[in-house]
Amino acid sequence: MRPTSAVSEVVVGHFGKNHRIFAPAMKKQSNIAIGMAAGIAAGVSYGMNPLFAKPLLADGVSIPTMLFFRYAISVIIMAVWMKLKGESFRVKANELRLLVVLGLLFSLSSLFLFESYRYIPSGLATTLVYLYPIFVALIMVVLKSYPNWQTWIAIAVTFVGVILLSLPSGKLSLHAGGMILAALSALSYAFYLVIVNRSTRIRHISNHTLTFYALAVGTVLFLCYQYTSHVPFMNGVSTWKSALNLTGLAIFPTMISLLTLAIATRIIGPTRTAILGVFEPITAILIGTLLFLEPITPRMVIGITLCLAAVLFMSLHRPSK
């Protein structure tokens, strides 16, 4: 990321006797760049869901089974990683309670999304989830933290782009229950982002620990959900391809996405992170078009262009003091 004009003025006018001002400014810019990159990585990795989920659904794997293995494999990998790195799993009781809430919010977001697929087209459901930047902004307003005008413009343009992406064809079969489930998925995700960013109780907890407990809570939740679904647990999980797809689903759109999401939210805040999440539907659409030969319409191209323009505008504007 190129330095803003404010940083350039520091370089030109104060590089001599006031050179100490330059280092903090550059460090801040470096941190923002890391946060933006993490936010994009979170969106792209989460957008890889269709790459692994569509073959699993075609094999007859149920949604509860898919979600359970997705979280269970992820939490095992994260636990091994933390053990090798010598990181502690210990948290205080009051911290654990909040981590459980965060895990429930993140897991419910996945659950509501997958359940909405039963009633509305999956493309519509996936893109409707990206109303969550609007929910994040509204929650932050309630908390008396007001986004700047550039962020509001980016949110508005993103909203228009998502609407265009959700209407790729002339007619859609809309179902009130499915629409509500997709909206609940977005709302759960928005609350997760805000709590991670705003809570002082867990601010000192590492991103790895935060991710581990979110995944652990999801594993338990989906195991319970599986036992109430009356579907054979291993139905459809019978080949090595299914095992690879379950592992890929656990690593990319779950563990990597959740970890980079936590990094981005803490560095650049929940609103900017939410807007960068538009890379999820963009990635999902590209995967569907290039790998599964799903059609792409001019309306979808316009929507993708608007979303990218909004992200670029938000990324390059000069931050306020």
Image (spheres, helix red, strand yellow):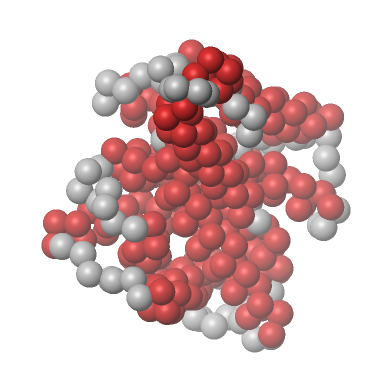
Q: Is residue 237 above or below residue 246?
A: below
Q: Position of residue 199 (x, y in %)?
A: 25, 42
Q: Is residue 103 above or below residue 310?
A: below
* 70 or 269, nearer to the observer: 269
Query: From this viewpoint, is residue 280 visible?
Result: yes
Q: Position of residue 212 (x, y in %)?
A: 37, 66
Name the residue rendered at 35%, 75% in the picture. Answer: 86
Q: Position of residue 67 (x, y in %)?
A: 49, 66
* 289 or 267, nearer to the observer: 267
Q: Is residue 255 above or below residue 154?
A: below
Name the residue rendered at 61%, 37% in the picture. Answer: 278
Quadrant of the rendered image containing residue 223: bottom left
Q: Is residue 224 above or below residue 238?
A: above
Q: In which quadrant of the rendered image does the C terminus lie?
A: top left
Name the residue rendered at 70%, 47% in the picture. Answer: 283
Q: Residue furthest left?
A: 93
Name the residue rendered at 21%, 61% in the picture. Answer: 96
Position of 245 with respect to 182 (left or right) is: right
Position of 217 with respect to 295 (left or right) is: left
Quadrant of the rendered image containing residue 147: top left
